Amino acid sequence: MTTPTNGQIGQRVWSYAGVLRDGGLSYGDYLEQLTYLLFLKMAHEQTQPPWDRESPIPDGLDWPSLLARDGDDLEVHYRHILEELGRQSGMLGIIFRKAQNKIQDPALLRRLIVDLIDREKWLVMDVDVKGAVYEELLERNAQDVKTGAGQYFTPRPLIKAIVDVIRTAPGETICDPACGTGGFLLAAHDYVAEHYPNLDSDQKRHLKLDALQGVDIVDDVVRLCAMNLLLHGIGPTRDESEPPIEKDDSLAGPPSSRFNVVLTNPPFGRKSSMLFVNEQGEQEREDLTVVREDFWASTSNKQLNFVQHVYTLLEMNGRAAVVVPDNVLFEGGAGETVRRRLLQQCDVHTLLRLPTGIFYSQGVKANVLSFDRKPG
Protein backbone atom coordinates (compact mmCIF):
# COMPACT_ATOMS: atom_id res chain seq x y z
CA MET A 1 0.00 0.00 0.00
CA THR A 2 1.36 3.41 -0.99
CA THR A 3 1.49 5.91 1.85
CA PRO A 4 -0.45 9.04 0.86
CA THR A 5 1.27 12.39 0.72
CA ASN A 6 0.43 15.30 2.99
CA GLY A 7 -1.58 16.90 0.20
CA GLN A 8 -3.54 13.75 -0.66
CA ILE A 9 -4.58 12.87 2.88
CA GLY A 10 -5.16 16.53 3.70
CA GLN A 11 -7.48 16.90 0.71
CA ARG A 12 -9.42 13.78 1.73
CA VAL A 13 -9.72 14.93 5.33
CA TRP A 14 -10.97 18.34 4.25
CA SER A 15 -13.50 16.92 1.85
CA TYR A 16 -15.12 15.29 4.88
CA ALA A 17 -14.83 18.51 6.86
CA GLY A 18 -16.99 20.16 4.21
CA VAL A 19 -19.56 17.37 4.30
CA LEU A 20 -19.80 17.52 8.09
CA ARG A 21 -19.89 21.32 8.01
CA ASP A 22 -23.02 21.02 5.87
CA GLY A 23 -24.34 18.71 8.59
CA GLY A 24 -23.95 21.46 11.20
CA LEU A 25 -20.46 20.75 12.61
CA SER A 26 -17.87 23.45 13.11
CA TYR A 27 -14.21 22.81 12.32
CA GLY A 28 -13.66 22.50 16.07
CA ASP A 29 -16.33 19.81 16.36
CA TYR A 30 -14.82 17.96 13.41
CA LEU A 31 -11.34 18.11 14.94
CA GLU A 32 -12.68 16.76 18.21
CA GLN A 33 -14.58 13.85 16.62
CA LEU A 34 -11.67 13.03 14.32
CA THR A 35 -9.40 12.89 17.37
CA TYR A 36 -11.63 10.34 19.09
CA LEU A 37 -12.06 8.16 16.03
CA LEU A 38 -8.42 8.30 14.94
CA PHE A 39 -7.34 7.28 18.41
CA LEU A 40 -9.68 4.28 18.39
CA LYS A 41 -8.44 3.26 14.94
CA MET A 42 -4.74 3.61 15.82
CA ALA A 43 -5.22 1.78 19.12
CA HIS A 44 -6.71 -1.09 17.10
CA GLU A 45 -3.85 -0.96 14.57
CA GLN A 46 -1.39 -1.49 17.42
CA THR A 47 -2.99 -4.88 18.14
CA GLN A 48 -2.12 -6.04 14.61
CA PRO A 49 1.27 -7.14 13.16
CA PRO A 50 3.99 -5.97 13.35
CA TRP A 51 3.17 -4.33 16.71
CA ASP A 52 0.96 -7.03 18.33
CA ARG A 53 0.42 -4.91 21.45
CA GLU A 54 -2.38 -5.20 23.96
CA SER A 55 -5.11 -2.65 23.26
CA PRO A 56 -5.65 0.07 25.86
CA ILE A 57 -9.35 0.05 24.90
CA PRO A 58 -11.70 -2.31 26.80
CA ASP A 59 -13.37 -5.05 24.76
CA GLY A 60 -16.62 -3.98 23.16
CA LEU A 61 -15.63 -0.31 23.12
CA ASP A 62 -13.00 -0.62 20.39
CA TRP A 63 -12.74 0.12 16.67
CA PRO A 64 -14.06 -3.27 15.44
CA SER A 65 -17.20 -2.74 17.54
CA LEU A 66 -17.84 0.50 15.61
CA LEU A 67 -17.23 -1.10 12.21
CA ALA A 68 -19.72 -3.85 13.03
CA ARG A 69 -22.61 -1.40 13.40
CA ASP A 70 -24.66 0.78 11.09
CA GLY A 71 -27.61 3.16 11.23
CA ASP A 72 -29.02 4.31 14.56
CA ASP A 73 -27.26 1.42 16.30
CA LEU A 74 -23.89 2.91 15.24
CA GLU A 75 -24.72 6.37 16.61
CA VAL A 76 -25.98 4.93 19.91
CA HIS A 77 -22.91 2.70 20.29
CA TYR A 78 -20.48 5.53 19.47
CA ARG A 79 -22.13 7.68 22.13
CA HIS A 80 -21.84 4.74 24.56
CA ILE A 81 -18.13 4.35 23.76
CA LEU A 82 -17.42 8.03 24.44
CA GLU A 83 -19.34 7.97 27.74
CA GLU A 84 -17.72 4.76 28.99
CA LEU A 85 -14.16 5.72 28.05
CA GLY A 86 -14.67 9.11 29.68
CA ARG A 87 -15.27 7.29 32.97
CA GLN A 88 -11.95 5.42 32.79
CA SER A 89 -8.98 6.38 34.95
CA GLY A 90 -5.53 7.14 33.62
CA MET A 91 -4.86 8.41 30.11
CA LEU A 92 -8.12 7.13 28.63
CA GLY A 93 -10.08 9.27 31.07
CA ILE A 94 -8.12 12.36 29.98
CA ILE A 95 -8.59 11.67 26.27
CA PHE A 96 -12.34 11.07 26.52
CA ARG A 97 -13.21 13.39 29.42
CA LYS A 98 -16.61 15.02 28.77
CA ALA A 99 -16.61 13.53 25.26
CA GLN A 100 -19.87 13.83 23.35
CA ASN A 101 -20.94 12.73 19.91
CA LYS A 102 -21.49 15.79 17.71
CA ILE A 103 -22.32 13.77 14.57
CA GLN A 104 -26.02 13.10 14.94
CA ASP A 105 -26.53 11.73 11.40
CA PRO A 106 -25.59 8.00 11.45
CA ALA A 107 -24.94 8.03 7.69
CA LEU A 108 -22.34 10.83 8.05
CA LEU A 109 -20.76 9.05 10.99
CA ARG A 110 -20.57 5.81 9.00
CA ARG A 111 -18.94 7.60 6.06
CA LEU A 112 -16.30 9.16 8.31
CA ILE A 113 -15.52 5.82 9.97
CA VAL A 114 -15.53 3.54 6.93
CA ASP A 115 -14.65 5.74 3.95
CA LEU A 116 -12.01 7.99 5.51
CA ILE A 117 -10.49 6.60 8.70
CA ASP A 118 -10.69 2.83 8.19
CA ARG A 119 -9.26 3.02 4.66
CA GLU A 120 -5.86 4.19 5.95
CA LYS A 121 -3.25 2.56 8.14
CA TRP A 122 -2.41 5.60 10.21
CA LEU A 123 0.42 4.18 12.31
CA VAL A 124 2.61 3.44 9.28
CA MET A 125 2.29 7.02 8.02
CA ASP A 126 5.18 9.34 8.55
CA VAL A 127 4.50 11.49 11.62
CA ASP A 128 4.69 14.58 9.41
CA VAL A 129 1.65 13.41 7.45
CA LYS A 130 -0.50 13.07 10.57
CA GLY A 131 0.98 16.26 11.98
CA ALA A 132 0.27 18.17 8.78
CA VAL A 133 -3.36 17.05 8.84
CA TYR A 134 -3.81 18.21 12.42
CA GLU A 135 -2.00 21.48 11.77
CA GLU A 136 -4.33 22.24 8.87
CA LEU A 137 -7.36 21.32 10.96
CA LEU A 138 -6.21 23.55 13.80
CA GLU A 139 -5.34 26.43 11.52
CA ARG A 140 -8.73 26.28 9.79
CA ASN A 141 -10.43 26.05 13.17
CA ALA A 142 -8.43 29.06 14.36
CA GLN A 143 -9.58 31.07 11.35
CA ASP A 144 -13.13 29.89 12.04
CA VAL A 145 -13.20 31.13 15.64
CA LYS A 146 -10.83 34.10 15.10
CA THR A 147 -8.15 32.83 17.48
CA GLY A 148 -4.49 31.99 17.01
CA ALA A 149 -3.41 28.42 16.33
CA GLY A 150 0.32 28.91 16.78
CA GLN A 151 0.04 27.75 20.37
CA TYR A 152 -0.46 24.17 19.26
CA PHE A 153 2.57 23.22 17.21
CA THR A 154 6.30 23.74 17.41
CA PRO A 155 8.04 22.56 14.22
CA ARG A 156 9.31 19.03 14.76
CA PRO A 157 12.80 19.72 13.33
CA LEU A 158 13.22 22.52 15.88
CA ILE A 159 12.04 20.25 18.71
CA LYS A 160 14.45 17.51 17.66
CA ALA A 161 17.36 19.93 17.41
CA ILE A 162 16.69 21.28 20.92
CA VAL A 163 16.36 17.80 22.42
CA ASP A 164 19.56 16.65 20.66
CA VAL A 165 21.41 19.51 22.36
CA ILE A 166 19.80 19.00 25.80
CA ARG A 167 20.47 15.21 25.66
CA THR A 168 17.91 13.79 28.06
CA ALA A 169 19.17 10.75 29.99
CA PRO A 170 17.71 7.73 31.82
CA GLY A 171 16.33 8.54 35.26
CA GLU A 172 15.84 12.22 34.52
CA THR A 173 12.53 14.03 34.87
CA ILE A 174 11.39 16.27 32.04
CA CYS A 175 8.66 18.93 32.12
CA ASP A 176 6.89 21.08 29.56
CA PRO A 177 4.61 23.62 31.31
CA ALA A 178 2.99 24.63 27.99
CA CYS A 179 3.07 21.23 26.36
CA GLY A 180 0.59 21.63 23.49
CA THR A 181 0.27 18.30 21.71
CA GLY A 182 3.35 16.88 23.45
CA GLY A 183 6.09 17.37 20.87
CA PHE A 184 8.88 18.10 23.37
CA LEU A 185 7.81 15.28 25.70
CA LEU A 186 7.70 12.72 22.89
CA ALA A 187 11.05 13.81 21.50
CA ALA A 188 12.69 13.67 24.95
CA HIS A 189 11.24 10.19 25.52
CA ASP A 190 12.40 8.96 22.10
CA TYR A 191 15.89 10.39 22.62
CA VAL A 192 16.35 8.33 25.77
CA ALA A 193 14.86 5.20 24.18
CA GLU A 194 17.07 5.49 21.07
CA HIS A 195 20.36 6.46 22.75
CA TYR A 196 20.05 4.04 25.68
CA PRO A 197 18.71 0.79 24.16
CA ASN A 198 19.72 -1.37 27.15
CA LEU A 199 17.57 0.17 29.88
CA ASP A 200 16.75 -2.14 32.77
CA SER A 201 13.17 -2.78 33.89
CA ASP A 202 13.18 0.01 36.50
CA GLN A 203 14.52 2.54 33.99
CA LYS A 204 11.90 1.50 31.43
CA ARG A 205 9.13 1.84 33.99
CA HIS A 206 10.42 5.27 35.00
CA LEU A 207 10.53 6.40 31.36
CA LYS A 208 6.99 5.16 30.76
CA LEU A 209 5.31 6.41 33.95
CA ASP A 210 7.43 8.94 35.83
CA ALA A 211 9.91 10.73 33.55
CA LEU A 212 7.53 13.11 31.76
CA GLN A 213 5.18 15.83 32.96
CA GLY A 214 3.15 18.10 30.72
CA VAL A 215 0.69 20.88 31.53
CA ASP A 216 -1.56 22.87 29.23
CA ILE A 217 -4.50 25.17 29.85
CA VAL A 218 -6.51 24.19 26.73
CA ASP A 219 -8.77 21.14 27.11
CA ASP A 220 -8.64 19.99 23.49
CA VAL A 221 -4.85 20.28 23.38
CA VAL A 222 -4.51 18.20 26.55
CA ARG A 223 -6.67 15.59 24.85
CA LEU A 224 -4.41 15.52 21.78
CA CYS A 225 -1.30 15.31 23.95
CA ALA A 226 -2.68 12.42 25.98
CA MET A 227 -3.59 10.59 22.78
CA ASN A 228 -0.08 11.08 21.37
CA LEU A 229 1.60 9.90 24.56
CA LEU A 230 -0.59 6.83 25.01
CA LEU A 231 -0.12 5.74 21.40
CA HIS A 232 3.63 5.91 22.06
CA GLY A 233 3.26 3.64 25.09
CA ILE A 234 3.73 6.49 27.59
CA GLY A 235 1.64 6.81 30.74
CA PRO A 236 -0.87 4.55 32.46
CA THR A 237 -3.78 3.13 30.49
CA ARG A 238 -6.51 2.04 32.89
CA ASP A 239 -4.70 1.79 36.23
CA GLU A 240 -4.56 4.36 39.01
CA SER A 241 -1.10 5.79 38.28
CA GLU A 242 -0.88 9.57 37.84
CA PRO A 243 -1.08 10.50 34.13
CA PRO A 244 1.91 12.51 32.83
CA ILE A 245 -0.36 15.22 31.42
CA GLU A 246 -2.81 17.55 33.16
CA LYS A 247 -5.01 20.49 32.31
CA ASP A 248 -4.03 23.46 34.45
CA ASP A 249 -2.73 27.02 34.38
CA SER A 250 1.01 26.64 34.88
CA LEU A 251 1.36 30.22 36.08
CA ALA A 252 -1.34 29.96 38.75
CA GLY A 253 1.02 29.05 41.59
CA PRO A 254 4.40 27.64 42.62
CA PRO A 255 5.18 24.17 41.23
CA SER A 256 4.69 21.12 43.44
CA SER A 257 7.68 19.34 41.86
CA ARG A 258 11.02 20.23 40.32
CA PHE A 259 12.63 18.66 37.29
CA ASN A 260 16.02 17.91 35.77
CA VAL A 261 15.00 19.27 32.37
CA VAL A 262 12.41 21.83 31.20
CA LEU A 263 11.66 22.15 27.48
CA THR A 264 8.91 24.49 26.36
CA ASN A 265 7.52 26.89 23.78
CA PRO A 266 5.10 29.05 25.80
CA PRO A 267 2.24 30.77 23.96
CA PHE A 268 3.29 34.02 22.32
CA GLY A 269 1.42 37.19 23.21
CA ARG A 270 2.70 40.04 25.32
CA LYS A 271 0.07 40.22 28.02
CA SER A 272 -2.33 38.04 29.98
CA SER A 273 -5.75 39.68 30.11
CA MET A 274 -9.40 39.19 31.04
CA LEU A 275 -12.44 40.40 29.11
CA PHE A 276 -15.27 41.90 31.19
CA VAL A 277 -18.34 44.17 30.80
CA ASN A 278 -18.13 47.56 32.48
CA GLU A 279 -20.93 49.58 34.12
CA GLN A 280 -21.84 51.12 30.77
CA GLY A 281 -22.38 47.67 29.27
CA GLU A 282 -19.24 47.91 27.11
CA GLN A 283 -16.57 45.26 26.85
CA GLU A 284 -13.17 46.09 28.30
CA ARG A 285 -9.97 44.11 28.59
CA GLU A 286 -7.92 44.27 31.77
CA ASP A 287 -4.33 43.12 32.03
CA LEU A 288 -3.79 40.33 34.54
CA THR A 289 -0.58 40.69 36.50
CA VAL A 290 0.79 37.40 37.83
CA VAL A 291 1.86 37.84 41.45
CA ARG A 292 3.89 34.99 42.95
CA GLU A 293 6.28 35.09 45.88
CA ASP A 294 8.70 32.83 44.03
CA PHE A 295 8.91 35.23 41.05
CA TRP A 296 11.51 37.95 40.73
CA ALA A 297 9.07 40.45 39.19
CA SER A 298 5.30 40.88 38.94
CA THR A 299 4.14 41.48 35.38
CA SER A 300 1.34 40.75 32.92
CA ASN A 301 3.89 39.77 30.24
CA LYS A 302 3.29 36.05 29.64
CA GLN A 303 6.74 35.31 28.27
CA LEU A 304 8.50 36.91 31.24
CA ASN A 305 6.24 34.96 33.59
CA PHE A 306 6.97 31.70 31.82
CA VAL A 307 10.74 32.32 31.96
CA GLN A 308 10.41 32.87 35.71
CA HIS A 309 8.19 29.80 36.04
CA VAL A 310 10.70 27.65 34.16
CA TYR A 311 13.40 28.72 36.63
CA THR A 312 11.20 27.66 39.57
CA LEU A 313 10.62 24.27 37.91
CA LEU A 314 14.32 23.42 37.71
CA GLU A 315 16.18 21.25 40.17
CA MET A 316 19.61 22.55 41.17
CA ASN A 317 21.87 22.06 38.12
CA GLY A 318 18.76 21.45 36.05
CA ARG A 319 18.81 22.66 32.46
CA ALA A 320 16.20 24.39 30.33
CA ALA A 321 15.53 25.42 26.75
CA VAL A 322 12.71 27.93 26.21
CA VAL A 323 11.42 29.44 22.96
CA VAL A 324 10.91 33.17 23.55
CA PRO A 325 10.14 36.22 21.38
CA ASP A 326 12.50 39.17 21.13
CA ASN A 327 10.60 41.29 23.65
CA VAL A 328 11.85 39.03 26.46
CA LEU A 329 15.41 39.96 25.57
CA PHE A 330 14.96 43.72 25.26
CA GLU A 331 12.00 44.83 27.39
CA GLY A 332 12.70 47.22 30.25
CA GLY A 333 11.17 47.30 33.74
CA ALA A 334 10.18 43.77 34.78
CA GLY A 335 12.05 42.40 31.77
CA GLU A 336 15.29 43.97 32.95
CA THR A 337 14.78 42.56 36.45
CA VAL A 338 14.11 39.06 35.13
CA ARG A 339 17.15 39.13 32.83
CA ARG A 340 19.45 40.36 35.59
CA ARG A 341 18.31 37.72 38.08
CA LEU A 342 18.45 35.00 35.45
CA LEU A 343 22.05 35.89 34.67
CA GLN A 344 22.90 35.94 38.38
CA GLN A 345 21.32 32.63 39.33
CA CYS A 346 21.76 30.63 36.13
CA ASP A 347 24.40 29.80 33.57
CA VAL A 348 22.72 31.40 30.56
CA HIS A 349 24.95 29.80 27.96
CA THR A 350 23.09 29.81 24.64
CA LEU A 351 20.84 32.12 22.66
CA LEU A 352 19.78 30.71 19.30
CA ARG A 353 18.07 33.20 16.99
CA LEU A 354 15.48 31.49 14.79
CA PRO A 355 14.50 32.51 11.25
CA THR A 356 11.32 34.58 11.09
CA GLY A 357 8.18 32.84 9.87
CA ILE A 358 8.75 29.54 11.73
CA PHE A 359 5.46 29.94 13.60
CA TYR A 360 1.97 30.87 12.44
CA SER A 361 2.45 34.55 13.29
CA GLN A 362 4.59 35.56 10.36
CA GLY A 363 7.31 38.03 11.19
CA VAL A 364 7.51 37.13 14.88
CA LYS A 365 11.18 37.02 15.84
CA ALA A 366 11.81 34.05 18.12
CA ASN A 367 14.81 32.70 19.98
CA VAL A 368 15.75 29.59 21.94
CA LEU A 369 17.08 30.59 25.35
CA SER A 370 19.09 27.85 27.10
CA PHE A 371 20.26 28.01 30.70
CA ASP A 372 21.24 25.84 33.67
CA ARG A 373 20.27 26.57 37.25
CA LYS A 374 23.42 27.19 39.33
CA PRO A 375 23.81 26.10 42.98
CA GLY A 376 23.76 28.79 45.64
Image (cartoon, rainbow, N blue to C red):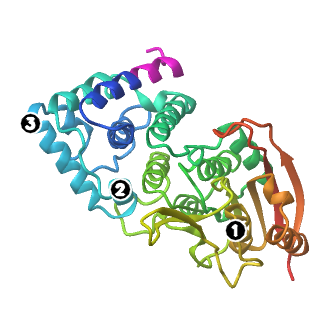
Residue assigned mark 3: 72
Res. 244 visible in picture: no
Secondary-structure class at tag 2: helix
Give the extent of the magenta segment. Answer: 1-12
> Does the magenta run of residues contain 138?
no
Q: Is residue 148 above or below residue 372?
A: above
Helix, strand, or loop for circle 3?
A: helix
Nearer the viewer's eye, disc 2 or disc 3? 3
Of label 1 and label 2, which has the lower sequence position? 2
Query: As drawn, is 51 to the left or to the right of 288?
Result: left
Question: Which label belongs to residue 305?
Answer: 1
Pick whichever, 183 or 295, lies toward us.
295
Which disc is residue 14 wearing?
none
Q: Is residue 347 above or below residue 101?
A: below
Residue 303's spot in the image, x, y percent? 71, 61
Identify which amino acid the numbered label 2 is placed on. Answer: Leu
Q: x, y (%) of residue 196?
A: 69, 50
- Disc with the residue nearer the chain's start (3 vs 1): 3
- Judging depth in this view, the residue of 82 and 201 nearest the camera is 82
Q: Which residue is mark 2?
A: 92
Q: Nearer the viewer, residue 136 or 129?
A: 136
Task: Determine crowd level at label 2: few under 14, some 14-19, many 20+ residues with C-alpha closer than 10 A.
Answer: many
